[in-house]
């Protein structure tokens, strides 16, 4: 700042413009040099601190593994090779900017995920790109702020609340199945699962979160389109290193598109929260009239967190509730859709498991007039649940979670993760580690037979992460998974399909690890309607 002041002083006292510019240029060079020196010193320090971890071959001492992380089928094969070679962990760095420890064994996963929430921090590499959308929500916040929000949000995922959501899971699934029947009656045989199932889970979440019937499975919605665009733009930004700096990103076309979609999403959730807050205040102020009670509306996610109070009687602000509602939509729809699609895919490839699941659901429905899964039924689908869990292992929707720590964390073998280093807990690597799972690339639901789960190492199966910062919505997701899978198998027989526009056989799919695990070109299944009443009839 003193250089700038000196330059301005000379300009004001008649010094030449050239001299002023030279002083400013010298000041800029000095600042850049100082920043570069600090960056390189930091890089050397982390390189030394992480020398206790094996390091795969890097492009150079400076750029490291920049460009080697691939969000493709080849990228997942690369993780398999790392696991085969290094067994439990390795170090990795992306230029001089990001220094990572990658772990893929339960013994190394446990101390990282079970570390106190007080020393656990969400890192900038992955989560900062979500902040403009999700604010300081539970997913991103740290320390005391995170602890308070977790306590306030827990009631929204209580079993009594989830019980009410099962009706919504049934109705949204019915709409999807009715659409499938119409498409199949029109001459099609194969359908792309991600498109249909993602719209269904969005439809379901909008009803559970806001009591809002978007009809998005049947017609376009500005809000739904904006959510899809935001998710795509976040993936795109992650792959462009220069776009990691806000002052660059917001000037790009992608940044401008992000802001536009963001305004749509924030306007929607802000309006819902404000209107619901006003309605609750109005109801609390109105005198009670016991002689003519009105039927109580079922409380949705926004209602519950609006009424939640901490030990000091304080609730969340409208901005905080908006952030949590946005997070519920972001984290809930795509992950659950991915889990449903991969479960249907795995059952389509294994007809004997599919038939066992179907018979389990048929037996459950004996003597019923309507094809509906009730809350009490979820515990009566043990084999179907085993198949879902094995699919979550083999094709986990989220491939990794990242953490940073404010103090060193000890790992086996005398290793230690220094404060500030990014720990990438590879869910994919852990789930496919041959030192942990026998024949890890095979689909075998018997792994999750209660008799066999006793032999699983703790933290060998972590599709929803683990520890204090595990996924708060995992029971919600598992309930929806069981309802959708059970009703789908009851009404359709599934076999591997192919894109009818491309022709060819139903070959293997190429996995596409983005925000969630998808496939290149979609996930196509061939559907055969079974002799069961259509969803329209079951609702009569």
Image (tube, helix red, strand yellow):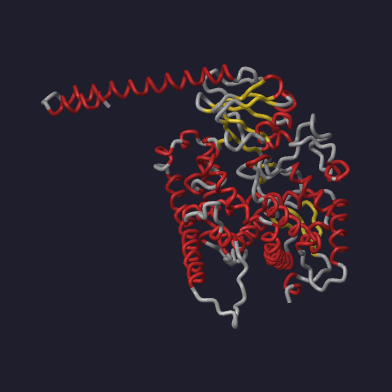
- Residue lying farthest to the left in this orientation: 14
In the image, 500 versus 410, the foreground residue is 410
- Residue lying farthest to the bottom in this orientation: 291
In percent of width and height, residue 533 lies at 79, 71
In the image, 171 versus 379, the foreground residue is 379
In percent of width and height, residue 11 lies at 15, 27
Q: Looking at the image, is 117 positioned above or below residue 184?
A: above
- Image check: 392 left or right of 273? right
Task: Tell me the quadrant of the picture where the C terminus can be found.
Answer: bottom right
Q: How many marks?
A: 0
Task: Tell me the quadrant of the picture where the N terminus can be found.
Answer: top left
- Image check: 498 left or right of 313? right
Residue 56 shows up from this direction: no
In percent of width and height, residue 342 lies at 73, 49
In the image, 14 versus 145, the foreground residue is 145
- Image check: 238 left or right of 157? left
Q: Looking at the image, is 153 positioned above or below residue 437?
A: below
In percent of width and height, residue 482 lies at 76, 56
Classify residue 69 by image quadrant.
top right
- Image check: 212 left or right of 271? right
- Residue for point 13% across, 23% down: 15
Residue 147 shows up from this direction: yes
Q: Looking at the image, is 456 positioned above or below residue 165?
A: above
- Residue for point 50% across, 41% down: 129
Q: Looking at the image, is 364 positioned above or below residue 478?
A: below
- Residue for point 47% across, 59% down: 270
In the image, 395 versus 286, the foreground residue is 286
């Amino acid at each position: 700042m003193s250089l700038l002041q000196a330059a301005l002083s000379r300009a004001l006292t008649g010094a030449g413009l050239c001299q002023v510019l030279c002083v400013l240029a010298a000041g800029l060079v000095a600042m850049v040099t100082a920043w570069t020196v600090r960056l390189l010193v930091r890089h050397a320090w982390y390189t030394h601190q992480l020398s206790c971890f094996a390091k795969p071959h890097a492009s150079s001492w400076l750029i490291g593994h920049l460009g080697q992380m691939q969000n493709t089928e080849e990228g997942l094969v690369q993780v398999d090779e790392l696991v085969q070679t290094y067994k439990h962990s390795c170090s990795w760095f992306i230029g001089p900017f990001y220094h990572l420890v990658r772990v893929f064994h339960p013994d190394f996963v446990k101390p990282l995920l079970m570390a106190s929430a007080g020393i656990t921090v969400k890192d900038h590499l992955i989560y900062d790109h979500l902040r403009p959308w999700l604010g300081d929500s539970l997913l991103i916040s740290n320390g005391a702020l995170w602890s308070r929000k977790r306590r306030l949000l827990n009631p929204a995922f209580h079993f009594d609340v989830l019980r009410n959501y099962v009706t919504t899971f049934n109705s949204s699934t019915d709409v999807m199945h009715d659409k499938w029947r119409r498409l199949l009656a029109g001459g099609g045989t194969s359908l792309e699962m991600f498109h249909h199932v993602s719209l269904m889970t969005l439809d379901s979440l909008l009803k559970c979160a806001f009591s809002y019937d978007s009809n998005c499975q049947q017609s376009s919605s500005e809000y739904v389109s904006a959510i899809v665009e935001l998710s795509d733009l976040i993936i795109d930004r992650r792959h462009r290193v220069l776009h990691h700096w806000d002052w660059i990103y917001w000037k790009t076309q992608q940044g401008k598109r992000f802001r536009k979609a963001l305004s749509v999403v924030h306007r929607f959730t802000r309006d819902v929260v404000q209107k619901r807050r006003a309605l609750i205040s109005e109801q609390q102020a109105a005198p009670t009239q016991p002689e003519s009670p009105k039927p109580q509306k079922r409380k949705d996610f926004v209602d519950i967190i609006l009424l939640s109070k901490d030990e000091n009687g304080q609730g969340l602000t409208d901005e905080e509730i908006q952030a949590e509602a946005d997070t519920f939509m972001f984290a809930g729809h795509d992950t659950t859709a991915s889990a449903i699609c991969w479960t249907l895919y795995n059952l389509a490839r294994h007809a004997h498991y599919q038939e066992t699941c179907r018979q389990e659901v048929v037996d459950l429905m004996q003597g019923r007039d309507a094809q509906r899964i009730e809350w009490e039924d979820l515990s009566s689908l043990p084999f179907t649940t085993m198949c879902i869990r094995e699919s979550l292992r083999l094709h986990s929707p989220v491939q990794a979670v990242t953490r940073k720590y404010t103090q060193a964390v000890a790992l086996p073998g005398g290793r230690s993760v220094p404060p500030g280093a990014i720990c990438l807990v590879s869910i994919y690597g852990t789930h496919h580690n041959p030192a942990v799972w026998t024949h890890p690339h095979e689909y075998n639901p018997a792994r999750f037979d209660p008799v066999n789960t006793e032999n699983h190492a703790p933290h060998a199966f972590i599709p929803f992460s683990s520890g204090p910062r595990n996924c708060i919505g995992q029971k919600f997701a598992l309930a929806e998974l069981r309802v959708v899978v059970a009703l789908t198998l009851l009404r359709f027989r599934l076999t591997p399909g192919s894109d009818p526009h491309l022709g060819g056989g139903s070959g293997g799919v190429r996995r596409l690890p983005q925000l969630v695990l998808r496939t290149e070109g979609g996930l196509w299944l061939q559907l055969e309607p079974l002799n069961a009443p259509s969803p329209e009839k079951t609702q009569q």
